[in-house]
Image: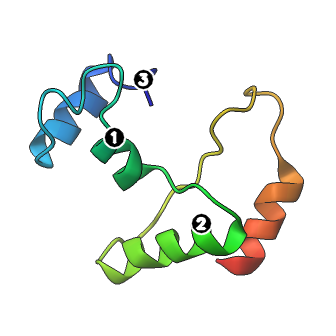
Amino acid sequence: MDSYLPWPNYRNNLLRLGYAEQDVTAPAGEKLVEDLVAIGDADEVAARVHAHLDAGADHVCLHPLGVPPDDVPVDRLSELAASV
């Protein structure tokens, strides 16, 4: 999350959504991470996706964190796709 916080478009959007300055200043606040990052197995991540959709989101972007950009975890994404 910390790599996104210096970007004004991300930071300003999060502030508009009601996050506090300390939430959007690296290191990212715990509340911000818990709200935006789905952590767990495929079923836990799918539940978070469905919670966003149930709350009115018309699309949810899934972006695996912690892997090199050229190392797309296709097997994990395929597993998740089956649950979502």
Q: Residue 76's quadrant in the figure? A: bottom right
Per the image, the residue denoted by label 2 is 45
Q: At which x and y percent is residue 22?
A: 17, 27
- CA neighbours of label 1 inside 10 A, class few (<14), some (14 to 19), many (20+): few
Q: Is residue 42 above or below residue 17?
A: below
Which residue corresponds to the image point at 48% horizontal and 70% vertical from the top-left? Answer: 48
Residue 29: image location, x then y, percent: 30, 34
How far apart marks 1 and 2 lie (CA) works out to: 18 Å
User: Which numbered dot is residue 30?
Assistant: 1
Q: Quadrant of residue 33?
A: top left
Q: Are marks 1 and 2 in contact (CB under 8 Å)?
A: no
**Which colouring convention does the figure follow?**
rainbow
Q: Which residue type does callout 1 highlight?
A: Glu
Q: Measuring 60% from the left and 70% from the top, which residue is drawn there?
A: 44
Residue type at mark 2? Answer: Val
Which residue lies at the image location 73% right of the left edge and 28% below the top edge? 69
As drawn, 1 above or below 32: above
Q: Neighbour class for label 3 at 10 Å: few (<14), some, many (≥20)? A: few
Of pointers 1 and 3, the one earlier in the residue sequence? 3
Q: Earlier in the sequence, mark 2 or mark 3?
A: 3
- The crowding category of the residue bearing disc 2, from other C-alpha atoms within 10 Å (few below 14, some 14 to 19, many at least 20), is some
| Circle 2: element type | helix
Cα distance in 3D space between marks 1 and 3: 12 Å
The x and y percentages for residue 17 are 15, 49
Q: Is the residue 73 above or below the residue 24 in the image?
A: below
Residue lying at 36% horizontally and 21% vertically, measured from the top left: 27
Q: Is residue 38 above or below residue 43?
A: above
Q: Residue furthest front?
A: 30
